[in-house]
């Protein structure tokens, strides 16, 4: 079954299943922990006061952290396959470079992102089916996990398997603090034009790497008297730029991987 | 058309030039010994044949196509990498099943290959728990999936004890005999390939020293060698040959005469055999030492 660009989708499916099976335990642990946390928050906070979004935002934060760790581990494993030469075994058996990277994209990024989105879609459908505020988080959630996968895969494809896991974990742990620096500068230099543009660009860049976290931070700031919301990047713009960025970056990965020495 | 052809190929890794203007051809239906010391450029050449590397300069052609551009070529090649790069955390059969499914090979064919390489009792073991000898067998098994037209084996006996090395060489002989598949086998242990190869490429420091059929190379470099002659009357032929001054010894082996002659007299000896066509059914040329040939090739270049 050949799809676009001569990609054999059957082979991709075979290899995705093989790769995912080898890390089934870490997938299972991530899904179980994230679902238990979400269920507990749903039980204790939603029924106590469904108007508050605390029942979704806190467990979602935990789940994102867990899934980012999972994504980082999977990306590191792809880096190891490239470094050790294990990839040669699969490529020697008719898997093309494009099919291999597509399999990696599915295992490392798209599958975990879709699993988490689908999990929250289920919760929302049961708990707050008409809540636009809660439901609109899902595209941001998908983009945040895909951007994380893109960053760690950039390192993994470059052969930096350890950096992929270390940077991935650091980003998962400290993205709030990382985002705080340009945001603070942005608020501080609101009236100083050259410094403002630099801080705005830096904030936009960090926000693109983590659109859901930025959306939450943005809504917290605009509801406080700290600063006029007009000077901050719009979360929807951030989401669109983030989505465009990971699509373009993955296209670059595919093109470069075709010529990479293995 | 040659199976493999390198045209002025250079490959550089940062500051190391692994291949420097390498040109050679490997003919169809040959078992090629790809010989050179460690770091000579053998693994780089194997990876270029597989399309895992892109040459910095020149062209690598496999059946007339560039493998790094046309990835379908790999479907016709069986490859065994130098290092045991197989995932250690899964069972032998899980890996082989996966690779067989990528190639759309039936379970029956897979079982046949597992039997052929002697892995039947090991299939349920984790790859990480196997000895080096059996890991090499896993490597050979996976390279045979899909009945490839060409086998590219990179140091198949590396880091093995003598008994395991013997086992792998015997297995390669069986594969050559039963499957009749072309092979390119790289090794830095030169004598061991003597039994299986009929073609050689000599490489050192990224430069191709020489290549060709062993028979031609032995003649060219006048290495000590022996003729195996099938005769209608072995005794009569033996008596005639022993009289010749350049003949060192004549032995009778299973109805075949093994005649050892001084280097430098191959052509006159072959002329003699042609003259005695009524007694000679057929003859072949065997070296006494591939290592000796290698030494002469290296000395010839330096």
Image (cartoon, rainbow, N blue to C red):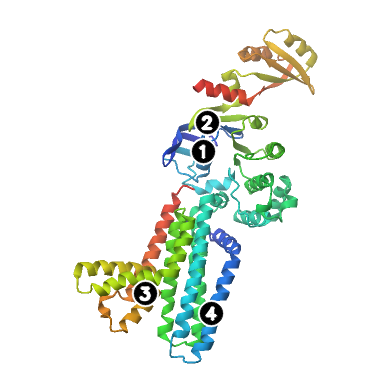
Q: What residue appears at the point 40 percent right and 84 percent down from the top-left corner?
A: A133
| Marks 3 and 2 on same chain | no
Mark 3 element type: helix
Q: Nearer the viewer, mark 3 or mark 2?
A: 3
Residue of label 3: A214
Tell me the tag on residue B203: 2
Residue closer to the observer: B281 or A116: A116
The reply to whether dot 4 and dot 2 touch (C-beta < 8 Å) is: no
Q: Is residue A51 above or below residue B80?
A: below
Which quadrant of the figure has residue B21? top left
Q: Please identify the residue farthest to the bottom as the structure is shown.
A: A48
Mark 1–mark 3 contact, CB under 8 Å? Answer: no
Question: Which residue shows up at 69% across the image and 19% down it?
Answer: B227
Label 4 crowd bin: few (<14), some (14–19), many (20+), radius 10 Å: some
Percent coordinates x, y for residue A78 in the rendering: 51, 57
Q: To which chain does the residue with label 2 belong?
A: B
Left or right: where does residue A50 sit relative to residue B92? Answer: left
Q: CA distance from mark 4 to mark 3?
A: 22 Å
Residue that carries the numbered disc 1 in the rendered image = B45
SS class, disc 4: helix
Q: Are marks 4 and 1 in contact (CB under 8 Å)?
A: no
| Dots 4 and 3 on the same chain | yes
Q: Residue at x 64, y 57 (%)?
A: B90
Residue A22: x and y in percent read 60, 62
Callout 2: SS: strand
Alpha-carbon span between mark 4 and mark 1: 54 Å
Left or right of A179? Residue B156 is right
Report, in whole angstroms, how far the alpha carbon at label 1 lies from the one at label 2: 10 Å
């Amino acid at each position: 079954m050949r799809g676009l660009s001569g990609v054999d989708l059957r082979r991709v499916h075979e290899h995705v299943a093989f790769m995912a099976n080898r890390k089934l335990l870490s997938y299972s642990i991530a899904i179980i922990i994230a679902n238990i946390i979400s269920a507990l928050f749903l039980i204790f906070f939603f029924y106590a006061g469904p108007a508050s979004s605390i029942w979704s935002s806190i467990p979602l934060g935990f789940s994102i952290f867990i899934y980012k760790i999972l994504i980082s581990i999977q990306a590191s494993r792809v880096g190891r396959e490239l470094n050790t030469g294990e990839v040669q075994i699969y490529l020697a058996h008719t898997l093309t470079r494009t099919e291999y990277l597509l399999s990696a994209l599915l295992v490392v990024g798209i599958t975990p992102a879709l699993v988490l989105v689908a999990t929250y879609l289920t919760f929302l459908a049961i708990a707050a089916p008409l809540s636009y505020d809660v439901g609109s988080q899902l595209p941001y959630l998908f983009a945040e996990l895909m951007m994380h996968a893109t960053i760690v895969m950039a390192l993994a494809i470059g052969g930096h398997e350890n950096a992929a896991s270390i940077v991935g974990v650091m980003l998962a742990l400290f993205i709030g603090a990382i985002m705080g620096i340009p945001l603070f500068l942005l608020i501080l230099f609101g009236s100083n034009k050259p410094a403002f543009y630099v801080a705005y660009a830096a904030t936009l860049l960090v926000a693109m790497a983590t659109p859901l976290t930025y959306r939450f931070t943005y809504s917290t700031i605009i509801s406080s008297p700290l600063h006029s919301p007009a000077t901050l990047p719009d979360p929807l713009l951030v989401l669109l730029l983030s989505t465009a960025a990971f699509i373009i970056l993955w296209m670059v990965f595919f093109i470069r991987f075709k010529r990479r020495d293995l | 058309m040659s199976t493999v052809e390198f045209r002025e190929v250079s490959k550089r890794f940062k500051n190391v030039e692994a291949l420097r203007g390498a040109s050679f051809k490997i003919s169809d239906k040959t078992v090629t010994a790809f010989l050179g010391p460690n770091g000579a450029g053998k693994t780089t050449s194997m990876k270029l044949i597989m399309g895992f590397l892109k040459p910095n300069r020149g062209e690598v052609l496999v059946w007339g196509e560039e493998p790094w551009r046309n990835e379908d070529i790999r479907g016709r090649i069986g490859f065994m990498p130098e290092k045991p790069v197989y995932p250690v955390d899964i069972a032998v059969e899980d890996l082989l099943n996966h690779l067989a499914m990528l190639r759309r090979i039936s379970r029956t064919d897979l079982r046949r290959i597992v039997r052929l390489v002697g892995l039947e009792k090991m299939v349920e073991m984790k790859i990480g728990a196997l000895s080096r000898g059996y890991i090499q067998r896993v490597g050979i098994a996976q390279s045979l999936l899909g009945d490839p037209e060409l086998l590219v084996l990179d140091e198949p006996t590396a880091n093995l004890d003598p008994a395991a090395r013997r086992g792998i060489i015997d297995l390669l002989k069986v594969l050559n005999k039963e499957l009749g598949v072309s092979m390119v086998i790289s090794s830095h242990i030169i004598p061991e390939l003597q039994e299986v190869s009929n073609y050689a490429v000599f490489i050192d420091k990224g430069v191709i020293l020489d290549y060709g059929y062993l028979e031609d190379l032995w003649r060219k470099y006048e290495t000590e060698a022996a003729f195996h002659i099938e005769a209608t009357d072995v005794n009569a032929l033996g008596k005639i040959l022993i009289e010749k001054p350049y003949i060192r010894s004549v032995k009778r082996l299973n109805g075949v005469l093994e005649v050892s002659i001084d280097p430098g007299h191959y052509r006159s000896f072959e002329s003699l055999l042609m003259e005695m066509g009524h007694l000679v059914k057929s003859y072949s040329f065997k070296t006494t030492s591939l290592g000796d040939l290698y030494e002469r090739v290296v000395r010839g270049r330096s």
